[in-house]
Amino acid sequence: MKLEGTHRISYPRVDLWKLMIDPEVLCRCVPGCENLEALPDGSYKMTLKAGVGSIKGVFTGSIRLEEMRQPEHFKMLVDAKGVPGFVKGVGTLDLAEVGPETVVTYSGDVSVGGTIASVGQRMIQSSARMMAAQFFTSIEAEAAAAAAAKKSSVPLEPPKHGFFAMPCDGSQGESDAG
């Protein structure tokens, strides 16, 4: 399944790049991410709670960033397995500075297998689009919080990302609905 799009974020490209490869920020922004740990080989070990329709579960696996050309491009490879099946994906992200904004263009190819694949291509694609939108909305909130902290010289307080965000320490605490 192909997934592509663009997203405009009012934040300098160099700074946005740093946010988009920071494991703590990514853990807060990837919908359902419970844990994201940087490994010595440059990859990340992840635990992700996700699902499509009534098929839900926990996936464990890895994310690897390749073709790193700071601050303009990287390639992401995802490989995860869980009781509901597997997810494998490869995608590229390109960051272009357009005035005070950064335009992120993304393109990827994702394949799923196992029980989760039984819900159908349209439902999987719809869920993938929704997760991408949530991710970019969260990255935009992170950028706004970082810009505000920098402007006011106060410590950065990570933003609350709303109903779908999970705590990155693996705890299942209450989340804000806002």
Image (spheres, helix red, strand yellow):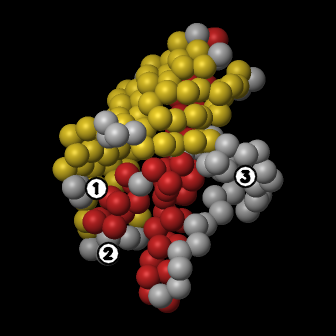
Foreground label between 3 and 2: 3
Identity of the residue furthest to the bottom in this view? 152
> How many other residues sit within 10 Å of disc 2, few (<14), some (14-19) or many (≥20)?
few
Compared with residue 64, is residue 160 higher up or lower down, i.e. above or below? below
The kind of secondary structure element at disc 2 is: loop
On screen, 151 above or below 67? Answer: below
Q: Which mark is residue 100?
A: 2
Residue kind at label 3, given as amino acid type: Phe
Which comes before the other along the chain, label 1 or label 2?
Answer: 1
How far apart in space, not on screen, are marks 3 and 2 (Cα)? 30 Å
- Say the numbered circle drawn on residue 163: 3
> Would you call the spot at circle 3 few (<14 residues within 10 Å), some (14-19), or many (20 or more)?
few
Q: Does 31 sit left or right of 69 as displayed?
A: right
Task: Please identify the quarter of the rendering in which residue 157 is found.
Answer: bottom right
Q: Name the residue: 49% across, 56% down.
A: 25
* Numbered marks: total: 3
